[in-house]
Amino acid sequence: MKTAILGGSFDPIHLGHLFLLHSVVTQTQYNNIYIIPAAQSNFKRENACRASAEERLEMARLAAADYRDIYPLDQVSITVSDMELKRGGISYTLDTVNQILETEKQNRVGLIIGDDHIAGLTRWYRFEELKTKVEFIVCRRNEDRASFEQALMPQGTQYILLDIRETAPQSATAIRENRDSCMDYLSPGVREYVRAENLYN
């Protein structure tokens, strides 16, 4: 099984994330997916998550369970991992990749990113080493297909440009800022959890 990683703050995880995973599973050979909530993003050091680490991890677990109902035909193994939360501090992708490579006994893993990350990739922690260990699965995040097709990945990277048919409208920022009007952005289990714990209110 080919392994891929989807990392992020997941504050909260939403249907757009699940659609992204579905697109990867159905359009690539990656079918062993790790969802990994970050302890602290290297590029969002000043922005604390609204939900706690435990709440974000639980929402990721609920979303992974909901995935089975939303996309019942997908042949995929999904693991929600707390490795970055346990590690604490700044969550460097390279550290996570190294841990997954050791666990899965593979030489390279897929790393799922949005095309909005391309411009800043070379600023990632120890990028020259990271690019030897991952294949970037780059997904279109906005409506501008032309700019996506012309996007230039850094030299020496292995990558797939995944042009999904439709871009997902869901936004974690929108959910945090206007929860009640954005509840439909959440999968059923996450929606119930957010209401029960009164998150983002």
Image (cartoon, grey):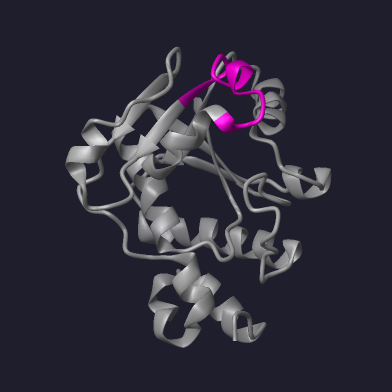
Quarter of the image that includes the C terminus: bottom right
Q: Residue at x 65, y 22 (%)?
A: 101
Residue 34 position (above or below residue 60): above
Q: Going by the image, does 22 lie left or right of 199?
A: left
- How far across and down, in percent of the image, does residue 58 sit? 66, 64
Q: Residue at x 44, y 80 (%)?
A: 183
Among the 4 quarters of the image, the one containing residue 118? top left
Where is residue 105, by image quadrant? top right
Asked if one can make out residue 3 in the rendered structure from this viewpoint, the answer is no
Q: Is residue 64 visible?
A: yes
* x and y, in percent, of residue 17 in the image: 44, 54
Report the front residue among 179 and 29. 179
Residue 126 belongs to magenta span: yes
Q: Is residue 132 left or right of residue 137?
A: right
Residue 49, compared with residue 110, is above or below; it is below
Question: Of 52 and 1, which appears nearest the observer?
Answer: 52
* Residue sitting at x 70%, y 68%: 55
Vertically, is 119 above or below 60? above
Residue 84 painted magenta: no
At 60% from the left edge and 23% from the top edge, which residue is drawn? Answer: 127
Residue 197, position as x, y percentages in the image: 67, 82
Whole-percent x, y for residue 194 in the image:
59, 78
Snapshot quadrant of residue 164: top left
Instruction: State the extent of the magenta-drawn residues as a range.
Output: 123-135
